[in-house]
Structure formats: C-alpha cells, structure tokens
Amino acid sequence: MSRSIVAGNWKMNTTPSEGKALVQKILSEVPQPGTRVIFGVPAIQLMQIQQIVSGHANYAVAAQNIHEKESGAYTGEISAAMLVDAGIEYVILGHSERRDYNGEDDDLINLKLTTALEHGLKPIYCCGEKLDIREAGNQEVVVGRQIEQALYSLDPEQMKQVVIAYEPVWAIGTGKTATNEQAQQMHAYIRRMITNQFGSDIANNTSILYGGSVKPGNAAELFAESDVDGGLVGGASLDAAGFAAIIRAAR
Ligand code: 13P
C-alpha cells in the first residue's frame, strides 16, 4: 500500500462557490492522480465537496475539526458521527492554529483522536515545534512529546488509521520551508517512535506528511526524501494549477 498523500488544508478560505470551482478545476487537471488527494475544507462545504469527489478514485475529503463528545448541547460544534454519515473519511486534528487560537492541548487532542477513531474517521494528526524550540535544538523533544501524548494510548488497529503531518510552526504561512534534510530528519525520528511503540509493520505503513510553505517549486524535492510521504498544503492548495503541480510531484 502506498503511503503517498497530498492533502490541502484550505483553513478559513473559499466561499462554497469558490470551493466548488477550485475542486472542479483540480479534478479536470488531474483526473487520475497517482497519489491519494485529500481536500480539507470548511465545514459548510463538506457535503458539497464530498459529492463532487465521490466516484473519483483517489480523491477524499477531510474536516478541519470535530468535537470530542458524541453529541449534545455544544452550540456550533460538529460531531464525528455527523461527518461519517456525510461520507467524510478524514479529519485534521492537532493543527498548530487550533492549539494556539483555540487552546487545544495534547489531552484534548487525544480525546478528539479517540472519538474520531471510534467512529471510523481517519485523523490527520499535526505536530511540530515553534521557532524558539528549533533554535534551541529541542525540536525532537517537543515533537516527541506531542507524538507520545496524542498517539501512544491508541491500540495498534487504531494507529493504522492515523496519518501524521509534521508541520514546523515557523514554516507555516511564512514562505520559510524546512530544508529537505530538516524534514527527513524529523520524519525519520517520528517513524522510529512509531516503530518503538507499535512495531515496524505499522510504522512502515504510516503516512508522514510534511506541512509548512509547500509550493510547486519545492514539493518534488521534499517528497523525494525517503520518509516524507507527501504534504499537507495550506496557501498553495488554494490555487488549482499550483495544487495540481504539487499532486503530480508526489511519488
Ligand atoms: P502553508 O502551506 O500555507 O504554510 O500552511 C501549512 C499548513 O498549516 C497546512 O496545514
């Protein structure tokens, strides 16, 4: 099974009309991608985009968040069961923007991961260090802790469903991409951690994506690294031609 995935995280961008046009253009540019392609779209567009991609092999949709509880009086929230019923396959969890702006910590993210997995949703779990941590050389300590606290309580069957995205916070939306070596080094470290906890079979089948200023111009060299299985793309996923080029750069 290929580990290759190119996922777009649209964040809070695109109206429903714009989102529809964007996906239709990408589908026409890359009707048969050689990699799994996932659109992480705003909640209001989930069902529409799922309908557009259904029937297109290798295309899927991700939500950008879920609530950790099953259901109930949580105004404004969306549950895992709602997504599954709408045909959604993935959910992005642990993104640094939600950690920073919505106060999500590793304990809460672990609860959300568990809820997602219990419903059969596949989490795209984001981790990554801030600039001061990188400058102090402590990135493996911090990312290691994020991996351990979020994922080590999962059972092996659950872990098989998880996609990991390493997104150094200093590279998100800054135009400053990690070097190929920095990405490869961290991805190899994460894979070693997964090996130690879950065994090499699971680790060797886990997709580990890089995120942080992935562009058409740097995607191929990043994806060429042996432990970089693809990308989680923010800004560049909003441009059809550019995102199509990134899809084609996947191994
Ligand atoms: P950019 O590609 O805009 O740096 O964003 C990366 C990201 O946060 C994807 O989740």
Image: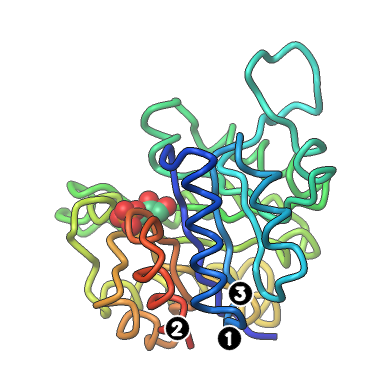
The residue carrying mark 2 is 248
Q: How many marks?
A: 3
Query: What element does badge 1 sit on?
Result: loop
- Name the kind of residue labelled 1 in the image: Gly
Residue at the image point whose x is 54% and y is 62% from the top: 164
Identify the residue at image location x=66%, y=13%: 75
Residue pointed to by mark 3: 36
Q: Residue at 33%, 54% (x, y): give it.
A: 235
Disc 1 residue crowd, few under 14, some 14–19, many 20+, Cα 10 Å: some
Residue type at the position of mark 3: Arg
| Amino acid type for the residue under numbered disc 2 | Arg
Judging by the rendered image, the residue that carries numbered circle 1 is 34
Look at the numbered disc 2 and give the secondary structure of its residue. Answer: helix
Q: Decide: is 183 above or below 166.
A: below
Above or below, 45 against 50 in this view is above
Q: Is residue 137 visible?
A: yes
Closer to the chain start, of discs 1 and 2, is 1
The reply to whether discs 1 and 2 touch (Cβ–Cβ < 8 Å) is: yes
141, 95: nearer the viewer: 95
Whole-percent x and y of residue 101? 38, 28
Please name the residue shown 45% across and 26% down the image.
102
Q: Secondary structure at mark 3?
A: strand
Q: Could you tell me residue 29's position as x and y percent?
A: 49, 77
Cβ(mark 2) to ligand 1 < 8 Å? no
Q: Viewed as shown, does residue 6 lie left or right of 32?
A: left
Of tags 2 and 3, the one toward the viewer is 2
Q: Dot 2, crowdedness within 10 Å: few (<14), some or many (≥20)?
A: some
